[in-house]
C-alpha cells in the first residue's frame, strides 16, 4: 500500500504540467501555453489596441481562440500563427461554419521561423520564452506595422519600458527604444490564465519609430556591450579598463590600415539597421541584468590581445588618452550607463566615431 501511495504522489507533478480545459485539450506549461480565460481582460486588451475595421491583425499563439474571436469582430482579417497542431485544429473547428471563418487565416508553424505577411497591427499573448527574439523580429518587419499590443512576463515588460535610473534599465531597454516607442498598458495577474503561470504579466504597446533612427548594427551593439558591462560604474572607469582599451585600439588600427586615399572608411557602409538577430537565445537580452556583473566577453580575452598586439606601453597610453579625451569632450567621464538617455548614447557613439574610434 505504501508503495502504491508513493507512486500516486509522484504522478501528481506530471498531471499538473498538462492542465486540461473544458474541451479536453491539455495545455503544456513547458511550451508557454497559458490561455486567457478572463473575458473582461480580453475585451480590455482589444479596446486598448485601437483596432480599425480595416485592419489586418497578426495574432501569435492564438491557442483556443478566446482572443481571436474578439479580434475577428473588431478588424477586417486575422492572421493567426500557431505552432501546436492541436490548437490549429481547435481554432479551425471553433470558427468553422460561422460568418467569421472567411476572415481567419491560420498559419501552422514556429513564428520565429515563419516569414510574416503584411499586417497593420499585432495583438498577442505569446509564449514568454520567445519574448526577446520575437520583439526584434517584429521590429525588423517591413513594411513597418502601426503598433503591437503584446502580453509579456511582467519583468520583461518593465525592462522594455524602463527609464534611465530605473533598476531594470539595461541593454534590452536601449535597443528596443532605439527602434520603437514602448508604453505600459496594464498589469495582468497570473490567475487570469489557464493554467496560471508562476509570475504576473503585463501588456505593452510597441510602436515602431517612423522614420527609423539609423545606426550601424554591429557598431551600436559593440558600443552598448561595453557601456553596460558595468552599468553602475562611471564611463571613465569602464573605458580605462585595459581589455577595453586593447579592443578599441585594435579596431582603430584596423580602420586606419583600411583607409585609402580619397575614400572613406567603414563609416559610410552598413547603414541599414537590422536588429532581427539581437534577440536570439545566445544574446540573452531578455534577462540581461548588466548590473556590475563580470562579463566573460572581456575576461580572458585580455591575455590573448596582449600577446597578439605586443604594444609598446607608450603607444597604448597615447591611445588611452585619445579615448578619455572623447569622454571629456562630451562631459561623459563621470556619467553612468544606467542613467544615460538614448540620445546621450547616440551622441557619445558619434563622438567616438568622429575620433576614428570604432566598436566593431
Image (cartoon, rainbow, N blue to C red):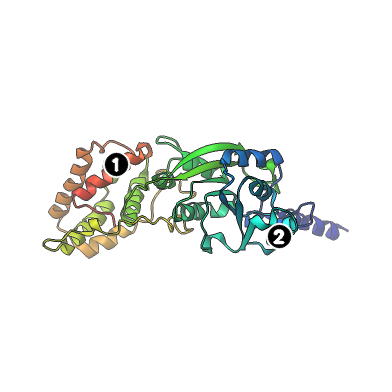
Q: Indicate the secondary structure of the residue bearing disc 2.
A: helix
Q: Residue at x 27, y 52 (%)?
A: 244
**Residue at image point 53% right, 51% down:** 131
> How dense is the environment of label 1, judged by Cα within 10 Å: few (below 14), some, or many (20 and up)?
many
Quarter of the figure that contains the C terminus = bottom left
- Position of 198 compared to 118: left or right? right
Depth check: give the residue in front, 31 or 98: 98
Mark identifier at residue 65 = none
Return the x and y of residue 148 as percentages of the image width and height. Answer: 52, 47
| Residue where numbered disc 1 is placed | 235
Q: CA distance from mark 1 to mark 2?
A: 55 Å
Question: Which residue is nearer to you in this view: 70 or 3?
Answer: 70
The part of the image, by quadrant, that contains residue 219 is: bottom left
Sequence-wise, the earlier of marks 1 and 2 is: 2
Label 2 Cα neighbours within 10 Å, binned few <14 / some 14-19 / many ≥20: some
Quadrant position of residue 246: bottom left
Q: Is residue 188 above or below residue 72?
A: above
Residue 42 visible in the snapshot: yes
Asked if the residue under mark 2 is in contact with the one under mark 1, i.e. CB atoms within 8 Å, the reply is: no
**In this picture, is 337 found above or below 311?**
above
- Residue 355: x and y in percent read 18, 49
Q: Percent from the top left, x then y, of residue 194?
A: 71, 48
Q: Which residue is mark 2?
A: 92
Q: Residue at x 22, y 45 (%)?
A: 351
Closer to the camera in the image, 200 or 118: 118
Q: Position of residue 127 (x, y in %)?
A: 60, 53
Amino acid at each position: 500500500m505504501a508503495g502504491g501511495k508513493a507512486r500516486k504522489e509522484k504522478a501528481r507533478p506530471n498531471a499538473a504540467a498538462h492542465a486540461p480545459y473544458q474541451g479536453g485539450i491539455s495545455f503544456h506549461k513547458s511550451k508557454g501555453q497559458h490561455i486567457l480565460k478572463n473575458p473582461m481582460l480580453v475585451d480590455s486588451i482589444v479596446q486598448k489596441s485601437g483596432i480599425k475595421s480595416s485592419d489586418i491583425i497578426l495574432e501569435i499563439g492564438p491557442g483556443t481562440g478566446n482572443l481571436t474571436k474578439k479580434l475577428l469582430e473588431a478588424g477586417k482579417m486575422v492572421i493567426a500563427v500557431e505552432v501546436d497542431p492541436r490548437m490549429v485544429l481547435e481554432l479551425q473547428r471553433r470558427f468553422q461554419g460561422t460568418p467569421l471563418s472567411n476572415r481567419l487565416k491560420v498559419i501552422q508553424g514556429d513564428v520565429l521561423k515563419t516569414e510574416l505577411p503584411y499586417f497593420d497591427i499585432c495583438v498577442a499573448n505569446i509564449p514568454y520564452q520567445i519574448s526577446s527574439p520575437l520583439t526584434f523580429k517584429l521590429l525588423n518587419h517591413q513594411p513597418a506595422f502601426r503598433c503591437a499590443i503584446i502580453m509579456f512576463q511582467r519583468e520583461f515588460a518593465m525592462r522594455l519600458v524602463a527609464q534611465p535610473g530605473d533598476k531594470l534599465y539595461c541593454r534590452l531597454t536601449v535597443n528596443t527604444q532605439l527602434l520603437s516607442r514602448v508604453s505600459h498598458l496594464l498589469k495582468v495577474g497570473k490567475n487570469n490564465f489557464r493554467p496560471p503561470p508562476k509570475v504576473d504579466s503585463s501588456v505593452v504597446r510597441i510602436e515602431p519609430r517612423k522614420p527609423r533612427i539609423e545606426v550601424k548594427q554591429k557598431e551600436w551593439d559593440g558600443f552598448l556591450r561595453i557601456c553596460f558591462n558595468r552599468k553602475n560604474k562611471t564611463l571613465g572607469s569602464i573605458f580605462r579598463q585595459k581589455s577595453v582599451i586593447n579592443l578599441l585600439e585594435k579596431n582603430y588600427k584596423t580602420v586606419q590600415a583600411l583607409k585609402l586615399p580619397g575614400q572613406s572608411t567603414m563609416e559610410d557602409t552598413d547603414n541599414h539597421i537590422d536588429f532581427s538577430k539581437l534577440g536570439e537565445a545566445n544574446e540573452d537580452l531578455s534577462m540581461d541584468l548588466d548590473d556590475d556583473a563580470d562579463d566573460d566577453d572581456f575576461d580572458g580575452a585580455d591575455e590573448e590581445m596582449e600577446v597578439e598586439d605586443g604594444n609598446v606601453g607608450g603607444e597604448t597610453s597615447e591611445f588611452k588618452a585619445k579615448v578619455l579625451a572623447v569622454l571629456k569632450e562630451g562631459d561623459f567621464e563621470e556619467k553612468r550607463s544606467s542613467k544615460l538617455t538614448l540620445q546621450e548614447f547616440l551622441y557619445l557613439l558619434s563622438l567616438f566615431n568622429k575620433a576614428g574610434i570604432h566598436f566593431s
